[in-house]
Image (spheres, grey):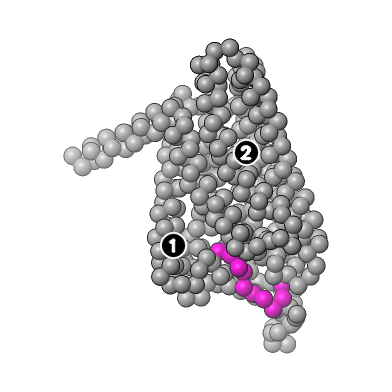
Amino acid sequence: PRCFYLKTHPLQKIMDKGNHSVITFVLLGLTSNPVTQKVLFALFLGMYLVTLTGNILIMLAIRGDPHLHTPMYYFLSHLSFLDMCYTTTIIPQMLSNFLAQRKTISFVGCMAQMYISLSLGGIEFILLAVMAYDRYMAICHPLYYNVLMNQRLCMQMAVGCWLCGFVNALLQTVFTLHLPFCGRKTINHFGCEVLAVQQLACSSTFVGDAVMLGAGVLILLTPFFLVLVSYVYIVTTIFQIRTAEGRRKAFSTCTAHLVVVTLCYGTAIFAYLRPRSHYSPKQGKTASLFYCIVTPMLNPMIYSLRNQEVKGALVKVVGLKGKRRTLISS
């Protein structure tokens, strides 16, 4: 198949040769049924608002309660901020497409969306491994925890997460930018997901498979392995605690993190580490919906429902807002 710029006017062909900015993609989305699109618009708009509200409340609670100024909640505030940014990268575009006749996105816009979502996703995977290490230090080495997990180290670890995520996304995006995109301009997805975009390339996918596999090992499997190792030590230490109450308290500090780890890593490994020959657009969209929309919405609920300290801080935040509204109205 011939590439896009070979089908343009001769003068335009000279101007745009090698320039993908003239390409416009069409996003198929989740469905073409107008009635279903309106229902999905209302559903995902509600989920988006719940995600924003929940994560903003978590960040306000952590910032406003001095008891939550600890490494665990410092990393949790980063996770909440990531979830807000991640869903904002995907959902507004999806919502506008539900109401649009022609669901198009420019090549530049598509690459920007892909880069930002890849960055934030990679940061979250690494951050979850850092949070597991924090729990390992708190449970397995409690006497040294406050000394080792100081503010400087926490900031360095957080910055490291962000840098690794941005660098990984940059490498994958640069590779995608150099792919020749052929006659097919339709992305069978609701967003510019990297696998769905690379399916449109008219060159061999061997290099793309290698890049994706390498990124998956470094950004996904390596942090996941570190999480597993951390929890092996954590569980071993918890079973050595003599009292049942002590074991319960120690394990309760890890429950929310374990649930979030299972949701995030499980869906991402299923989506990205399968052979390219087994890639299914339907399964890819389902997995993307889960880790792009459902998981960021559930994370604040998981951490607030399983943690009494966060519950108390959230009650204070909501109570203060209620008092302020009463004073203003009076």
Q: Magenta includes 189? A: yes
The image position of residue 195, as x and y in percent, is 68, 61
Amino acid type assigned to the residue bearing label 1 in the image: Leu
- For residue 259, side relative to residue 219 (left or right): left
Quadrant including the N terminus: bottom right
- Residue farthest to the left, as pictured: 330
Quadrant including the C terminus: top left
Q: CA distance from mark 2 to mark 1?
A: 31 Å
- Return the residue at label 2: 127
- Whether residue 113 is visible here, answered yes or no, is no
The image position of residue 218, as x and y in percent, is 74, 44
Vertical placement of 288 versus 181: above or below? above
Q: Residue at the spot x=68%, y=24% of the render?
A: 233
- Return the residue at label 1: 40
Crowd class of label 2 (few under 14; some 14 to 19; many from 20; radius 10 Å): many
The image position of residue 278, as x and y in percent, is 71, 60
Q: Which residues are magenta?
A: 181-190
Q: Magenta includes 268? A: no
Mark 1 residue element: helix
Amino acid type assigned to the residue bearing label 2 in the image: Leu
Mark 2 residue element: helix
Front of the two marks 2 and 1:
1
